[in-house]
Image (cartoon, rainbow, N blue to C red):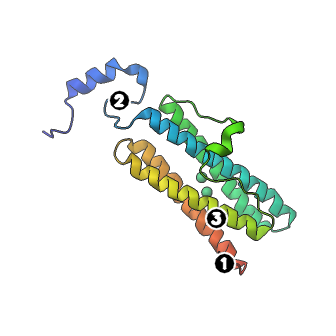
Amino acid sequence: MNDHLSDIETLRRNARAHIDRGPITEAYGADSERVIAVLNEVLATELVCALRYKRHYFMASGLSSSSVASEFQQHAAEEESHADRIAARIVQLRGEPDFNPATLEKRSHAEYVTGNDLVDMIREDLVAERVAIASYQEIVRWLGETDTTTRRLIEDVLAVEEEHADDLLTLLEQMGRPA
Ligand SMILES: [Fe+2]
Ligand SMILES: [Fe+2]
């Protein structure tokens, strides 16, 4: 028998004793309050990115750059779905997702920089993606084996942010304006 695994009796006793903690069991290795706080920073980052991409989508549509605009629109929708998934995980961990608009940008890792022309907008989005990529990589390493569900979620989101950064760099290259 593997010494690292709890026996069935202990698992059953603990599961019954702490049912008010929902999915958080004795095997949960992370500090859930700390994880919730970090997830709220990720939530703020995703919401700020969704808002910035939305502005860029409408601005680019005005500049009649439909291919860039549709890229912005797709990214905005993906950041929004990331925000939803992060908020759902916060609630699963018995926390409260913070959607307070007054403090959103302060809590976000990435900034809300509007950009003046198309190239500016793409560059600012690329900077924001690179901030998110670096901070999510840190979070993945920090979580390690302690909360593998949250880690998988962040890894999923991270993979999409890397696609976004790649999309943006490709756009700059296509425009003959490499970053
Ligand atoms: Fe995202
Ligand atoms: Fe992104």
Q: Residues within 10 Å of mark 3 (few under 14, many from 20)?
A: many
2 and 1 marks in contact (CB < 8 Å): no
Is the shortest distance between ligand 2 and the CB of mark 3 under 8 Å?
A: no
Tag 2 residue: 25
Distance of label 2 from label 1 (alpha carbons): 49 Å
Tell me: 59 left or right of 93: right
> Which secondary structure lies at badge 3?
helix
1 and 3 marks in contact (CB < 8 Å): no
Task: Residue at the far front: name it.
Answer: 106
Closer to the chain start, of discs 2 and 3, is: 2
Displayed-image quarter of ligand 2: bottom right
Quadrant housing residue 84: top right
* Label of residue 178 in the image: 1
Q: Give the percent coordinates (x, y) of residue 145.
A: 34, 46
Amino acid on which disc 3 is placed: Leu
Tag 3 residue: 126
Amino acid on which disc 2 is placed: Thr
Q: Residues within 10 Å of mark 1 (few under 14, many from 20)?
A: few
Closer to the chain start, of discs 2 and 1, is: 2
147 lies above or below 69 = above
Mark nearer the viewer, 2 or 3: 3
**Along the line of sight, the residue nearer the viewer: 18 or 49:** 49
Tell me: 108 left or right of 116: left
Amino acid on which disc 1 is placed: Pro
**Along the line of sight, the residue nearer the viewer: 7 or 28:** 28
Q: Give the percent coordinates (x, y) of residue 64.
A: 85, 67
